[in-house]
Image (spheres, rainbow, N blue to C red):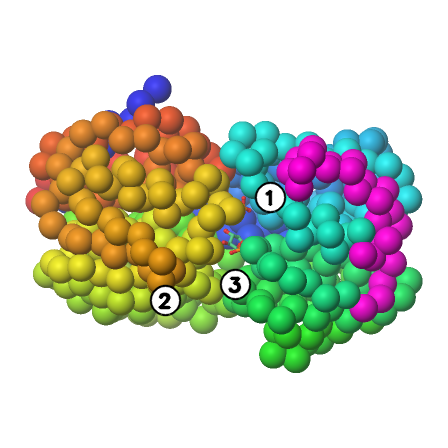
Amino acid sequence: MDQSVPPGRVRGICIPPCSKSYAQRALAASLLAEGTSRLHNIEFCDDTRSAIRCIEALGARVRRTGERTLEIDGGLSPAGDRLYVGQSGLSTRLFTPIASLCDTPIGVVGEGPLLHRSFRTMIRTLRALGVRVHDRNDHLPLHIQGPIRGGEVQIEGLVSSQFITGLLLALPIAEEETTIHVPHVISTPYIDITIDTAERFGIEILHKDYKEFYVAGGQRYRPAEFEIESDWSAAAFLLVAGAVAGEVTIRNLSVLSRQADTAVMTALVRAGASVIDEGDTITVAHRPLQAFSFDATQCPGLFPALAALAASAEGTSVIKGTSRLENKEGNRAESIREEYAKLGIEVDLDEEDTMKIRGGRIRGGHVHSHDDHRIAMSLAVAALNADTPVVIENPACVAKSFPDFFERLESLRTAE
Ligand SMILES: O=C(O)C1=C[C@@H](OP(=O)(O)O)[C@@H](O)[C@H](O)C1
Ligand SMILES: C=C(OP(=O)(O)O)C(=O)O
């Protein structure tokens, strides 16, 4: 069913969902820890559910002991021969290396846009570390058989940091030590949250300026009590909604987080929004917005929220890092260009790796999510300032990261 988002004002308080990046990592670490871990403040979007299915398939026992608490008995011991990763790029890149710690043959299958995403670098590197991999031209489904060896490996042509994350979480329990050379690393804040999560489960990962990673083999994950923090990637849409159409206060969110998408605060300030940070509460309010420049190379997940901000700002905003979007759900840069054009907003993509968005009058109309949760949320936020309602086809894809996004946005509406 389509989702119609009428123009209007927003005002209110919201708590965003938990970070699916932290949740998936903590689930992986709980699988690898012998003993019982407890994850608090966990919520269940599609990607988190995919990770839960994967750890169960790999031997974990998962119990829900509270509305937002999971108790997990860890221990890597594959229960079947198939990992179902849903639409999650991160679950694929986490659990394929983890499954390859065993010598059991395992199939890795997914669905939807994930089937069009390339896993070339991951496949090549796993082979270099002794894993047998059958693939469909660099795409899912995969058939793998470990065990993965430690050793020394160089990763070229890295399109996603997620694969480094997968190796960093798997390799501490390989027998040998590993050195990973990454000449051109990207999305480094995501690597920081990987190292942070591992550390909280007793694992040490060392690196030199993200170019060389050293992982000692034979380490042991210790079970942990782990509080999952709120998701800056989801909160970014609500904060931008405040900036373009009223005032939104987000609770339980700290700028001291290691998450990449805290950077949305810089873009909001540059655009001229009012931003008040009170520790774990952030309020963003509308002011006349001007065009801004922003480099999103290390935080590519912010592009869709920034597109909604730029569409409501006076002048042409310039956002760098579009090449980072090619291997997401479809080509996100193209999806943004195509759908914003339907709303009368011109988006140029150039050879210089930048997106230029000319803000101005936003028309209502029919748009498509491209089955991409972040495109659907971006268009919904832009709709707040449109002349007439924006009707979004296939809005259900928001379930990947933020299942009740539309309900929460509606709950913020005000007649003022
Ligand atoms: O590790 C993670 O949780 C993620 C890493 C990033 O991927 P890339 O390294 O491909 O940018 C990010 O864009 C994605 O949404 C989540
Ligand atoms: C692309 C995303 O996630 P993943 O790569 O894990 O599928 C996302 O959350 O926007």
Residue found 51% across the figure and 57% down from its top: 229
Return the residue at label 3: 187
Q: Is residue 132 magenta?
A: yes
Element type at mark 2: strand
At which x and y percent is residue 239? 29, 55
Q: Amino acid at mark 3?
A: Ser
Residues at circles 3 and 1 in contact by the CB criterion of under 8 Å = no
Mark 1 and mark 2 lie on one chain; the one further toward the N terminus is 1
> In which image quadrant can residue 183 be found?
bottom right
Q: Is residue 290 magenta?
A: no
Residues at circles 3 and 2 in contact by the CB criterion of under 8 Å = no
Return the residue at label 2: 295
Mark 3 and mark 1 lie on one chain; the one further toward the N terminus is 1
- Asked if ligand 1 lies within 8 A of label 1, the reply is no
- Asked if ligand 1 lies within 8 A of label 3, the reply is yes
Q: Amino acid at mark 2?
A: Asp
Image quarter hosting the N terminus = top left
Return the residue at label 1: 118
Real-space Cα distance between discs 3 and 2?
12 Å
State whether residue 215 appears in this view. no
